[in-house]
Amino acid sequence: MTHSFLFAAEEIAHAGDGGWWADTAGIMLVSPFVAFLAILAFGKRLRYNGAEFAIGALAINTLWALVLFFMNMTEGVLREPFTFKVGDIGSGLVFELGWAVDGLSIMMYLLVNLVGLLVFIYAVGYMEGDRRVPWFFAAFSLFAGSMLLLVGAPNLIQLIIGWEGVGLASYLLIGFYWEDHENVNAGNKAFMVNKLADVGLLLGAVLVGVALGTFDFAALNTAATEGHAGLSAVAIAGGALLFFGAMGKSAQFPFHIWLPDAMAGPTPVSALMHAATMVTAGIYLMARTFPLYQQMATDLRPWMVAIGTITLFAMGLLALVADDIKKVLAYSTVSQLGYMMTAVAAGGYTAGLFHLFTHAFFKALLFLGAGSVIHAVHSNNMSDMGGLRKYMPRTYATFVIGALALAGIFPLSGFWSKDEILATLGHEGYTAVMWIAIAGAFVTAFYMTRAVALTFHGTYKGHGHPHESPAVMTVPLIALAIPSVLAGLLNIPGVEWPGIGNFTEWLAVRVVPMGDHHAEAIDFFLAGVGTLAAVAGIVLGWLIFAPDRDTQQERDRFEVPVLYPLFRRKYYMDDLAMGISRFTMGPFARFVNWTNTYIIDGIVNGVGGVVYHLARFIYGGVDQRGIDGIVNGLSAVADAAGSGLRKLQTGRVQQYAASFVMGAIVLVIVFVLVR
Amino acid sequence: MIATQFLILAAALFALGVYGLLVRRNAVLVLLSVELMLAAVNINLVVFEAMWRTSEAIGQVFAIFVITVAAAEVGIGLAIILMIFRNRQSANVDELDLMRW
């Protein structure tokens, strides 16, 4: 531990401040929102339906992120967060917005922007001719922007704003095809499960913030490291609540239930959601507040490890039985998030984040590959696929690279990051967990082999003629395949690349040293066992699924009694959640419904009835008879008088003359008499 | 004074004019009746001037005015009657009811 402290402190001592690029890094947090508004305003009129704005914004961001990342590689970039005070909350607490520039946030900037950019470009091809494309890119920009707001947050308040923004955008995108009620339900489910967990985040933030007098992450981490008395009093409760929030976003057991359903959205959404944004938010929060768990809330860590372990193993098994290729990948994501959470909880700050980093590339690659296949086959089900390697060679090659990286085959990126997690678990004394994680690696390799075999090998079972996707989709696949292969080399234990060091050092550029363990050399035993597990999974999976079977049951399902139905029903977790909500929320909902139907509706209908009859009286009695009567009566009088009098005007001049003479005679008589 | 005879003459002439105006159906004769009435008035004017002899001879002057206006009126009236006759082959005032409601 002492060694690590020294190492980190030394690193920070000669960190640069990032100069102009760090000063202007806030542009990354703003540009996607600008793109969002621009797409809403002008998207429909443009050739690519507003993708121009979305891609432009992320391209600019990627430039910034790359520059900052390279600066961080060479000299380290650490600066006081740039903040603008928005207002006072009261009790000395302030609400500030800004952007953090340190090793962790720079890594996340790069991940979100780079993966986001590639996914956006891919989406131009994937969404071609689809419904509501401008809205898709607008919501997608909102999604990326919220995530950037989240990872750039210098304090808990901004993190919560970004967090909720991500939740909102994911809700909009999961329910993107809202014409099908099922998709709406998936969106609702994701939103509600997340919202339940968000309550924990909110309470945790308030608890920690009030105990500390600030929401600032730097202050929180410093206080945790220095043993702040007020913070240590609430460390367990606050830490548990924050972890509760992280469990929701990062789909940890038992909050994982929303994530497979989130596959209802368009595939690029799944790719971004599972790789760089949304689900990484929980892991990011744990890493951001790492000293709180490492130094203070240490009693929580075994529980967190337990939840992570359940997630990584149990959820991986579910991927074995899914027929929907996206669901296989979804359960795989949940499982990999379990790895990350386990690692961070066990004290492996770097190990967890390194896996997050490599996973983002190969999982985005796998999802985009799956999207490419779905685009060609027009079905999500692997039972409609098979033999596609002949039709889609580029998709096949990149998908296999992603699958091998995920399985953890040397020397692809997944091998190094998974190995580091195993090493950390071993070092921190979680030996049993380590073996479960190795078993998880076996399962991972197994289900990925199954997915590859069912999708790309054997004979084609679907309809129509599948074709390779256009370049706008395959180029991002190739671009993602490169880091999927190479990213692992950035953090080989004990290897310092000349001039740039390694990933561990880049991530250690924080205000407070993280104090996590770093292996000095490769543990060949663990690496060997891990690889063996992965290879065993691949071989077994190949033997079972590669032979082309005639019927779908034979080909698609390797049914084991008891376990198969258990997995198919997802351990009955969905039913449990529905049951719980039915028994807790059900009566309440019925009460609210009853109140609504009989009391509120009664009042509303009563008021409506009174108004209706009053209006009828006013219309019939006052308006029609009274006012209209007067108006019509007056005009009728004028009409009658006019038609009577006009008869005097005969047009006969002599009649007029006679009247005239008569009048004159009358006047003469009057004058004579009055005299 | 012998004014009374002249006034009786004027009154008779006026009454004759009124009668003609009311009963004649030919528009030319109606116009002639109007002229008779105007002539009666002129006689009155001249008689009263002869009786009172104003310094400016107002009666005669007015009589001249009336003759002038009557001449103009007859000119216009005959022109109108001529046009109506041309259009309708008739100058019968009974048939002229174009200006009614």
Image (cartoon, grey):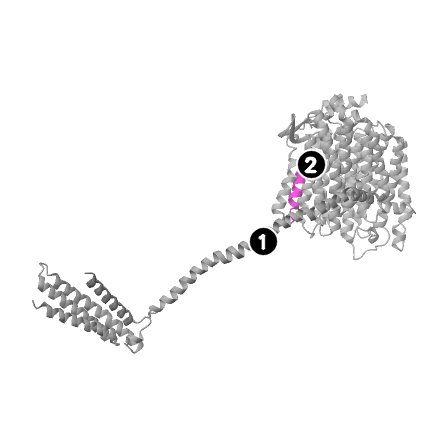
Residue A139 occupies which quadrant of the picture? top right
Residue A277 occupies which quadrant of the picture? top right
Q: CA distance from mark 1 to mark 2?
A: 52 Å
> Circle 2 sits on which residue?
A162
> Circle 1 sits on which residue?
A613
Q: Residue furthest right?
A: A561
Q: Which mark is residue A17?
A: none
Question: Does residue B33 appear in the picture of this structure?
Answer: yes
Relative to residue A421, is residue A49 drawn left or right?
Answer: left
Chain holding disc 2: A
Count of all numbered marks drawn on residues in the image: 2
Chain holding disc 1: A
| In front of the other: B96 or A555 | B96
The residue type indicated by label 1 comes to: His
Q: Quadrant of the C terminus of chain A?
A: bottom left
Relative to residue A346, is residue A60 drawn left or right?
Answer: left
Instruction: Note whether B67 is above or below A305 in the view shown.
Output: below
Q: Residue at x 82, y 53 (%)?
A: A384
Task: Tell me where the magenta segment starts and ends, as one range.
Answer: A47-61
Residue A226 occupies which quadrant of the picture? top right
Numbered disc in front, either 1 or 2: 1
Q: Position of residue A514 (x, y in %)?
A: 77, 26
Q: Position of residue A589 (x, y in %)?
A: 74, 44
| Chief secondary structure of the magenta portion | helix
Mark 2 Cα-neighbour bin, 10 Å: few <14, some 14–19, many ≥20? many
Contact (CB < 8 A) between labels 1 and 2?
Answer: no
